[in-house]
Image: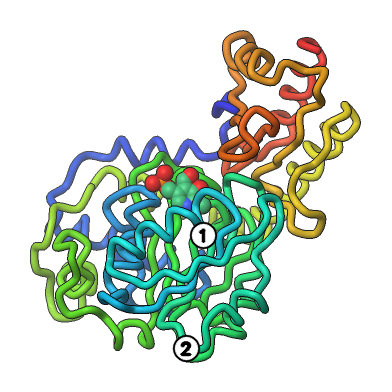
Amino acid sequence: MGPGPGNPYPEVALGFARPLLGHLDPEFLTVLDETNDRLRQVWRTSNALTFPVSGTGSAGMEISFVNVVRPGSTVVVGVNGVFGGRMCEVAARAGAEVVRVDFEWGQPVDPEQLADAHPSPDVIALVHAETSTGVRSDVAAVADRKGDALLIADCVTSLGGIPVAIDDWGVDIAYSGTQKCLGVPPGLAPFTINERALERLVPTPQSWYLDLNLIAGYVGGDSGRSYHHTAPISMIQGLHAGLGALLDEGLEASWERHQRVGDLLKKGLVERGFELFAAEGHRLPELTTAVVPPSIDEADVRRRLLTDYDIEVGGGLGPVAGKVWRIGTMGHTARVSNVNMFLAALDDLL
Ligand code: PLP
């Protein structure tokens, strides 16, 4: 669903359009510090090292693993979709012995099963909101069972759209993306890491670019700033503005808006004969997955929704390709008018 009229986040565009500043310009560093403060509020954390990684959500995934995984580290990963699978690949490339715990697509990660997978893992990782299936897993319940392990949570599709509470839950490392419920164009990965995880940093990780020991000297800010890489100025100015808009709306209000819009969409789909794919009680408001009735040529209708109505619906991935639609109502697209437009277009086409 495109931005359309009435986009409540014009501030984001203004943020991007701000004049370029140097990456060590005090004015820009103030914007960066404020962005990090805003991220702390959105993450619900007091973690000092909280900042937007230069790169998309996958860069957030990489930075999370390469900085705490050593060759031979045991990493337990809960996999209930594409992005849990990607976590396994990233952990393996960092040298981990990966213990992959698979769950049926459409079901959440089971915290007990994950905890039982290994007696003393170094890291446990899972995706909070699986974008390939529309399922929410209970990160807090996994954190309760993490023991001495570090917990990495992928919050790419959850941050800003549903409750995330890094400190209360006991998550050690988390990353997100700007382009989902934060309603900002892609290009940065909001990231946060606590003291407990910082004590276990790999001294010289495989990646120079994503080495937290080096990056902290730029984003940390306490003892001056040293150049590591040039910050993506406009991206950060855009994120600064988008987070400002989100906090002005209020986190709870944003969660409530996503819920209300997601519920409306699910109701409309069920009324039209679609079956909801994600397990009840674990359905994401911001991403609705629906099994397309066999009477509908899913690829053709999806194509016509895009070409004739400007509405983009995601197709199924992996085992549910060609069977399931993934419909995002995230960030500023989470609006009743978008759902009504989508359902009207669907009625036209069917
Ligand atoms: N994790 C999840 C849950 C995602 O949905 C995505 C992207 O959609 C990613 C990670 C990777 O993010 P990106 O495509 O921004 O690199």
User: Residue 120, labelled with which disc?
Assistant: 2
| Residue at screen point 65% across, 13% down | 300
Left or right of 80 in this view: 153 = left
| Residue at screen point 30% across, 35% down | 17
Quarter of the rendering containing residue 348: top right
Left or right of 215 in this view: 155 = right
Q: Is residue 34 visible?
A: no
Mark 1 residue element:
loop
Q: Residue furthest right?
A: 271
Left or right of 201 in this view: 91 = right
Q: Is residue 233 visible?
A: yes
Please provide percent x and percent y for residue 350: 81, 13
Residue at label 1? 155
| Residue at screen point 53% across, 90% down | 147
Q: Residue furthest bottom?
A: 148
Left or right of 222 in this view: 348 = right
Please provide percent x and percent y for residue 249: 60, 53
